Image (spheres, rainbow, N blue to C red):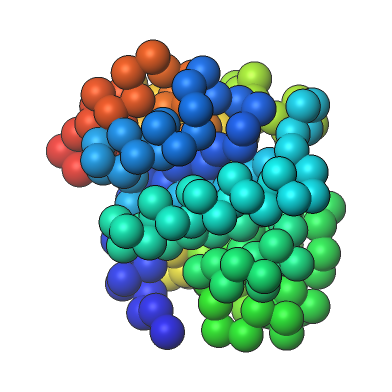
Amino acid sequence: MHTIDELKQQLKIYFIMGSNNTLQQPEIVLDKAIRGGVSIFQFREKGMGSLKGREKLQLASKLQHICRLNNVPFIVNDDIELALELEADGVHIGQEDASCIEVRKLIGNKILGVSTHNLQEVEEAIEHGADYLGIGPIFPTETKKDAKAVQGTQLIEEIRNLNISIPIVGIGGITHLNARQVIHSGADGVAVISEISQSSIPFEQTMKLASAVFNK
């Protein structure tokens, strides 16, 4: 089991990646990113050119191994079967994925993250067993073609003003240049994809991001 405080620490630098949105080999990028300061990792293998079946399982297994060697939680996006097969540390779901209640039943006490975009979704996610919330997109993003409208840090601030203490990670267009703003608004951490995966220097890029988050 994980405590809320432990989870808040783990969410500080949240890296999300699949094989189809990285410049270098995913294993190399993840290893460098963890050495640079990544504290939790989500395997998100979706969209154009993404791996399927056995290939997807093999890559997930390799990335999970790197996470385990470094004591970094390994989260699977949406694919509950894969998460259970690998005994992943948790699952992250969006509003269009399986229901929070069903996923909680399947994964037991593993970490459950839910993407939310308004207070109603926030309240439902908490009621149905979410361990943390992904809030966004905070800034414009190119990574998710079906991303909702950009909302800035407004929802994070609303949640904190209501004294809701659930761990929150901001996502969407976050870079080392604007990460501090997200933390100041009340988020516990920042989630990034392209900031690290599209960088030719993922180790250094992660260090810049970590510096922005921790030097608040």
- Residue 198 visible to the viewer: yes
* Observer-nearest of 85 and 21: 85
Q: Is residue 6 left or right of residue 50?
A: left
- Residue 116: x %, y % from top left: 66, 53
The residue closer to the viewer here, 170 or 142, is 142
Q: Residue at x 61, y 57 (%)?
A: 76
User: Does residue 125 appear in this view?
Assistant: no
Compared with residue 47, is residue 16 higher up or lower down, i.e. above or below?
Answer: below
Q: How many marks?
A: 0
On the image, which quarter does residue 213 sit in? Answer: top left
> Is 37 in front, or is 157?
37
Q: Quadrant of the C terminus?
A: top left
User: Which residue: 24% across, 40% down?
Assistant: 35
Front residue of 20/39: it is: 20
Q: Which residue is most to the top?
A: 200
Q: Quadrant of residue 10?
A: bottom left
x 35%, y 40%: residue = 31
Q: Residue at x 77, y 27 (%)?
A: 49
Q: Residue furthest left?
A: 215
Question: Where does the N terminus fall, quadrant-wise?
Answer: bottom left
Q: In the image, 77: left or right of 190?
A: right
Q: Quadrant of residue 109?
A: bottom right
Residue 172's spot in the image, x, y percent?
56, 33
x%, y% of residue 91?
62, 64
Residue 205 x %, y %: 30, 24
